[in-house]
Image (spheres, helix red, strand yellow):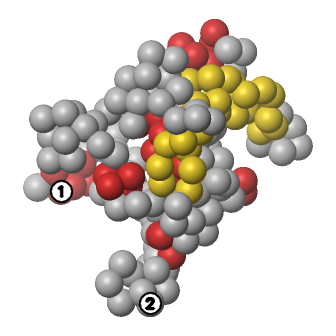
Amino acid sequence: MFPILLLSSFLSLGFKLMNEPHRGYISLGSLHAFDYYKELHLHDCRGFFSALVDSIQLNSMVFIATALQSFALGAGHSVEVAHYVRSWPFPTRLARRIKRNAGNESVWRATGPTQGRCLWEMHGVWDWDERRRVAVALREKYFTRHPVSHRPVRCRPFC
């Protein structure tokens, strides 16, 4: 019904039913890095408006955490994350590293199904080294193989 109403309007230029699909962690080759040309986006991970405020305050800087860093940040650990600035001829360049989640806030609820633990930590993908205060990858290739059949997994062509 909604698309029909839009199509009948003289002011409608077009509409899109689905945003760009993304593979997430499927077939992620490394927990320590990302593909600069495919994965680095010019936004802050916390949302548009807070990113806009941070961009203004940090001179258009954005941070991109690796998978391992994002697991640790979500689990309530303070992690040093790379911050990038817009540049030319490449879309961005590394400017500095900044400690994020200084308040050690966890996104996992103690009353939730994981009882306050990171899901990927429970699956043995990573762990926190208390002595060195860093996240440690235990199963680097976890997202490249099916957990039961151990066959390689690939993302569909549209991801």
Query: Tag on residue 107?
Result: none
Q: Which residue is mark 1?
A: 4
- The crowding category of the residue bearing disc 1, from other C-alpha atoms within 10 Å (few below 14, some 14 to 19, many at least 20), is few
Q: Position of residue 146 (x, y in %)?
A: 39, 81
Q: Is residue 105 above or below residue 35?
A: above
Q: Amino acid at mark 2?
A: Arg
Viewer-closest of 62 and 126:
126
Q: Which residue is mark 2?
A: 151
Query: In the rendered image, is residue 106 in sight?
Result: yes
Q: Is residue 96 above or below residue 75?
A: above
Contact (Cβ within 8 Å) of mark 1 with mark 2: no
Q: Position of residue 26 (x, y in %)?
A: 46, 69
Instruction: Label 1: state its secondary structure.
Output: helix
Q: Position of residue 62 (x, y in %)?
A: 64, 29
Q: Position of residue 130 (x, y in %)?
A: 52, 35
> In which image quadrant can residue 112 be found?
top left
In the rendered structure, the answer to whether residue 99 lies left or right of residue 6 reads right
